[in-house]
Image (cartoon, helix red, strand yellow):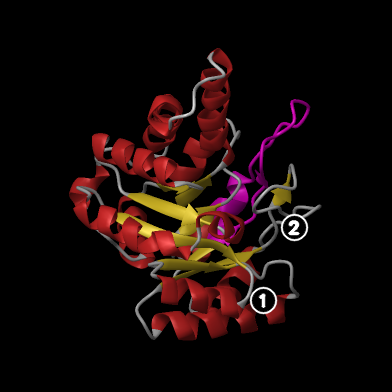
Amino acid sequence: MLYTGKSILDVANAHNFAIPAFNISDWAMFNGIIDISEELSAPVIIAIHPDEVSHITTDLIPAMHARAHRASVPVAIHWDHGGTYEQIIEAIKAGFTSVMIDASLLPFDENVALTRKVVEAAHAVGIQVEGELGTIGANDSYGESGAAEIIYTDPADAVRFVEETGVDSLAIAIGTSHGLYPVEKNPELRHDLLEQIKAAVGIPLVLHGGSSNPDSELSRAVSLGINKINISSDIKVSYHNRMREILGTDERLREPNAIQPGSVAAMKVTAAEKIRLFGADGKAELY
């Protein structure tokens, strides 16, 4: 079942769980994520950011639509971390059912102006918009990147931002970073800040940089009002580490059907852990 971002997140908000937004970068990953979501009867968001789009191209989106329509669980296809108005228009034309405009590195008023412009265009065709306020840290230079310094989301600013932009969901900064955390870094989320923001705005809240965070930190965030958590690095590490192991066993291996199934299986184990951690398993029956 193909859903818009709003129709899938509003249910999570009403029933206090989080939907994983898994960043995929090839067709095998996409199918594996749909399969494990169906096995656990969990709604899922397929996230693709511009760097990943440049790899798979938007030509793959109609095929994703076809697979989503056959799925036994709700599926939204989300353009992650769009940086410009033009990118968002491209995403809508390509068939994404949810979009994010990330203008968080701009001054507040410029972030509001660009986000509002995106909301007006997207809402005109029934597409949900996620905005971002505050900055997510960066552990490496891959994909979504991030900011050198975390600027925590201010609850009062969040209220004003939601009112002035009309966003359907809001990515907030409470201490996470994109990428994989180095061993010496111990992320601690500002759950107190999350509570204040949720009470102030009420709409679905999003946590970026969910990979490598302690399970206890994430489950607490879900209980306090996070409704979407982005997971990219964790599933990609599982997928590609297993692929390295498989390829290392026999230099003659060359057929995808001999290489990728094991990688997909490893990724599914990690994805299943996140689905259960976020309380999304079994929630497809709510839709």
Q: Which residue is mark 2?
A: 151
Query: Depth-wise, is mark 2 or mark 1 nearer the camera?
Result: 1
Quadrant of residue 133 in the image?
A: bottom right
Q: Which residues are magenta?
A: 171-197
Residue 203 is a magenta residue: no
Residue beneath the point at 74% across and 31% down: 182
Q: Which residue is mark 1?
A: 111
Dot 2 crowding, Cα within 10 Å, few <14, some 14–19, many 20+:
some
Residue 224 visible in this rendered orientation of the protein: no
Disc nearer the start of the sequence (2/1): 1
The vertical placement of 78 against 162, above or below, is above
Horizontal and vertical percent position of residue 267: 45, 31
Q: Nearer the viewer, residue 280 or 56?
A: 56
The vertical placement of 29 against 16, above or below, is above
Quadrant of residue 2 in the image?
A: bottom left
Horizontal and vertical percent position of residue 27: 41, 46
How far is mark 2 from mark 1, CA to CA?
Answer: 14 Å
Amino acid type shown at disc 1: Asn
